[in-house]
Amino acid sequence: VPTKNIPAQDVEKIYRAAITDPTMYARIDIAFTTGLRPGEVLGLLWSDIDFERQTLSIERQVQPVRGKGLVFQSVKQDEIRVIPLTDEQCAILLRHREHQDRQKEKWTRDENLIFPNNKGGKQTSKADRARFHRVCQQAGVAKYQIYQMRKTCLTNMHTDGVDIKTQMQFSGHRQASTLLNHYIFPTEESLN
């Protein structure tokens, strides 16, 4: 059974549960509002954000490579994407950066990552999933898969009437049929 989007009432609960953790709040907000792949989120650098222009460049992803550990790789379609950020997204990311700056004294390295591990290096997808599952548990919702945040974003864009070309820009997909067949689902609200 393919995973679907997360219902709106559970998204609200997840946001409320993460509010006390600026890092996790920024992590879920990026996923729920930009639709990035989990590896792309983990590959984001602070230099990818232009706060003045309010844009985010998606240039790389973090992937495990046998014998090399976690490495930066190009994004799936080998095409850098630039997407806009809202005032609120920028504020959330700036709060996270202030929180992160206070944590840096515990780090052993600094790779300029927006969402590093607790030592400042690349975070594993397993650790990323575990943090998200803890927030789901705190929120009292199902143990959703982290990839469902991407599907939720793309479903919401579609439901809100965002044109398919914009959805393709955010998702990194070249085929509209891929989006429609695998990432966009009817919401409870639209069905009602």
Image (cartoon, helix red, strand yellow):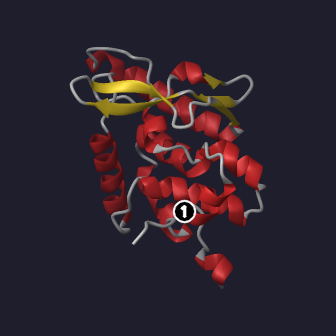
Q: Return the x and y of residue 58 as percentages of the image width and height.
A: 58, 31
How many numbered marks are there? 1
121 above or below 140?
above
- What kind of residue is marked 1? His
80 above or below 37?
above
Quadrant of the image occupied by residue 57 = top right
> What is the residue that sits farthest to the left in this orientation?
67
Q: Return the x and y of residue 143 as percentages of the image width and height.
A: 33, 64
Q: Return the x and y of residue 61 as percentages of the image width and height.
A: 45, 32
Q: Looking at the image, which residue is at 50% across and 23% down?
A: 45
Instruction: Tell me the quarter of the image containing the C terminus.
Output: bottom right
Q: Which residue is mark 1?
A: 182
Q: Return the x and y of residue 1 as percentages of the image width and height.
A: 39, 72
Q: Looking at the image, which residue is at 49% across and 67% down?
A: 4
Q: Looking at the image, which residue is at 30% across and 16% down?
A: 105
> What is the residue that sits farthest to the bottom in this orientation?
192
**Camera-nearest residue between 89 and 99:** 89
Quadrant of the image occupied by residue 191 = bottom right
Q: Residues within 10 Å of mark 1 (few under 14, many from 20)?
A: few
Give the structural element (helix, strand or loop) at label 1.
helix
Q: Looking at the image, which residue is at 61% across and 42% down?
A: 172
49 above or below 139?
above
**Camera-nearest residue between 78 and 155:** 78
Residue 72 falls left or right of residue 70: right
**Camera-nearest residue between 12 and 126:** 126
